[in-house]
Image (tube, coloured by chain):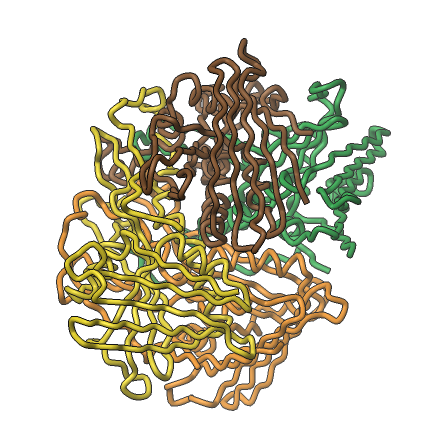
Chain colours: A yellow, B brown, C green, D orange
Amino acid sequence: MRRISCFLSSSSTLERATNLKDSFWLSSQRGISTSGPDLVNDGSSSVRRYANFTVYKGKAALAVSPCLPTFREVDAGVSRVHKKGGVLLTFWPAVGQMKYDWQKKQAIALSPTEVGSLIALGPADSCDFLHDPAMKSSLEGQVKKSLSISPMKDGTGYVLHFTVVNNVQKTNERFVVPVTKAEFTAVRTVLSYVLPHIMGWTQAARPQPRSTVTDKPKEKTEVRPDPSVEWGR
Amino acid sequence: MRRISCFLSSSSTLERATNLKDSFWLSSQRGISTSGPDLVNDGSSSVRRYANFTVYKGKAALAVSPCLPTFREVDAGVSRVHKKGGVLLTFWPAVGQMKYDWQKKQAIALSPTEVGSLIALGPADSCDFLHDPAMKSSLEGQVKKSLSISPMKDGTGYVLHFTVVNNVQKTNERFVVPVTKAEFTAVRTVLSYVLPHIMGWTQAARPQPRSTVTDKPKEKTEVRPDPSVEWGR
Amino acid sequence: MRRISCFLSSSSTLERATNLKDSFWLSSQRGISTSGPDLVNDGSSSVRRYANFTVYKGKAALAVSPCLPTFREVDAGVSRVHKKGGVLLTFWPAVGQMKYDWQKKQAIALSPTEVGSLIALGPADSCDFLHDPAMKSSLEGQVKKSLSISPMKDGTGYVLHFTVVNNVQKTNERFVVPVTKAEFTAVRTVLSYVLPHIMGWTQAARPQPRSTVTDKPKEKTEVRPDPSVEWGR
Amino acid sequence: MRRISCFLSSSSTLERATNLKDSFWLSSQRGISTSGPDLVNDGSSSVRRYANFTVYKGKAALAVSPCLPTFREVDAGVSRVHKKGGVLLTFWPAVGQMKYDWQKKQAIALSPTEVGSLIALGPADSCDFLHDPAMKSSLEGQVKKSLSISPMKDGTGYVLHFTVVNNVQKTNERFVVPVTKAEFTAVRTVLSYVLPHIMGWTQAARPQPRSTVTDKPKEKTEVRPDPSVEWGR
């Protein structure tokens, strides 16, 4: 079964940043910046930790990394998800064995729902993601990203085809990365782990401090979902 | 296979609140109020964080959000689950493309067991939940909520039918929300994550402080399960 | 397929306590005693939180609760799992609709491996656990506990049969608890969550403080696994 | 289906340590050293906690334990994964019933991808891991480790065959450990739990302190993946 997702979500702002400002690490830093456990011992210092999952193949390298959502205070002591998180897939073309062109990277940010379709991907399933990172900007329609994931004929894994067509820069870049069943299972496992994080549920599900258990909510904290940030078919 | 759950649990108190006091955010606030990590740095402030998973469809919007259990101290330094948590499904009718009537929302709170039936739902399975949010109150039997989840014929997802019949207000509201396989997988993943939270296991499973390892329990802390809050068939 | 596990592990000490000292809550307290998040704010107080998953059926009630492992310091600043954790299943006989005899409870503690067999249980699978809670004591062989889990013929769930034969007290108690597919899925989900906890991996997998990263281990901290506490077939 | 993984990764440095310095506990200590929850109560002390999953069989014993990654500060307040974590499998030969030769242990460290292949292992699947722990050292090719996992004919579990051929010490050691379906499910469950830990995602996915939300990343913190530490086929 082939599912097609035409996803034009807030996460595409990550890609826009990635494209226009080549700030992959800005994105992923904002995504996975963190205070290490040391913070508990020493509130005065904060260490940001980065991690990803990278596979190095013959034609390209692929790095998968989480982007946490950001929260914005909407009222005194009350914050909600401001920018949804996602999972960033970054590709680099190979220029030799174990050599890659780190300048020519291209990235696509998957939304929580797209992460769900990866988690649900069966051995014989395929899926496609079509993104317009410049959506709702003056460049809308000028950049098209297409990620296609198809099963290998011998059932030993999947092949990722990622294409970025940029009509502004007149570029058309293609990346092909085969992933083994073992690599995909490792990715699927961490995606299942990280999905509640990028959706903000891990922070929302924390126990409330005893002192606020009986607090009454303020009406003005009623926050309505915003359809403009996501449109499902 | 079609399973029918006639669940009349404590979680329905959430729905009663939702109905009679239109306090969806009160419920979810009580559910997911939280002290952010900042609390570790600054014990004097507490930030509540909210998160949900929302899909916007042609006829209605659906938001899924967790409601944590509340603990009550039953003895000095000993607390147990006082009110069980759940997962709240809130529906809004569409009044135009990407426009929804935020005042006409209706919600149903799923118990841990009902969450289990969603997690167990196979591609060809269906399930129904019938709730009386006013149970054990003077309004018992006056409000009927029915949530039905059925697979799409083409196997690409599920369709949720939610009906609220209120004999007091003489209203009969219907909501229809199709969810893709990817969206349902995202929901199933976060439901699996949040289930131990709404059951209180994440707080109960925390390591005990060294100082209390050798403490003897007090007999009066023996707490018997209360059948009145839950009745399984 | 019917699997038989004759498990005579350290977790049976929990059962012995449960039998001889009727200290279910002692066990589960030791198991799930915890310092609430408040502890972060106020190191002077410690709140223990309890949680379980209980189903109330016509003939008996069943409560599932986690028992965390205990750690013992084997060297300065070095501790290892001293007593393995488990999952406690407690049964109460019904004495009327929604009425149960809380004094006549019987419990069986499942080891991590037995929890694994529950997680792996397929729709058509069965499993049996045979315990001698008094093993290696003067009462060895006097008390036999047998838990049998079989699928319902209509595939809508499982039936648990729990029998405790006590030759000392000349008693033979039987409990029968049917669980729906939804209830079993909820249990399976929290068992998957809690398994790393009862095995001690959640505490072992925590990041080490920066200050000790370069510490060299002391030879005398080499700890050999102890076959006497567990014997697999 | 039989998959063969010829994995020569950074994790093999763990094995080299294990071989040449017999420092299994050094490895696993570095891996799972941790500050217990006590640290929250008493910042002045740090307790390291160890845990593993061990099965004792007729011919050998097998212990599975996690090895966390180490982070190195690459810029002020910015650290990234320095050494990838893994899962260590340690074998001891039996010298009698419930007696094992603790001196003759041999270990193999599985990479995140290899852990993924274990998680993905179906009832009828097999997999093989071939390691050269001395890779890129003067001893390269002198030591060969081979771990083979095959399903039992009756479908009740798997059999692990582990062979270490050491041309320097002129030794050839073989270990055979059958694991039941229940034991493998327990292992698979904790491997799924620990995979995000050994990949560093659990530390990377932590919320950032409020004070650093608006911090701009420093360009020099751009960190390129290093193909030399991992080479996928």
Question: How many numbered discs, if any?
Answer: 0
Provide residue D138's location: percent of width, then percent of height: 38, 90
Which residue is painted at 63% across and 47% down in the image?
A: B125
The answer to whether A175 is drawn above or below residue B138 in the figure is: below
| D87 sits left or right of D230 in the view | right
Provide residue B121's location: percent of width, then percent of height: 59, 47
Q: In the image as oriented, which residue stretches furthest toward the front?
A: B96
Q: Is residue D32 in sight in this rendering?
A: no
Provide residue B53's location: percent of width, then percent of height: 39, 43
Q: Is residue A7 in sight in this rendering?
A: yes
Provide residue B132's location: percent of width, then percent of height: 56, 22
Which residue is painted at 73% across and 42% down in the image?
A: C158
Quadrant of residue D179 in the image?
Answer: bottom right
Which residue is painted at 68% across and 49% down in the image?
A: C9
The answer to whether A15 is drawn above or below residue C129 in the figure is: below
| D227 sits left or right of C54 in the view | left
Q: In the image as oriented, which residue stretches furthest toward the top?
A: B138
Quadrant of residue D12 in the image?
Answer: bottom left
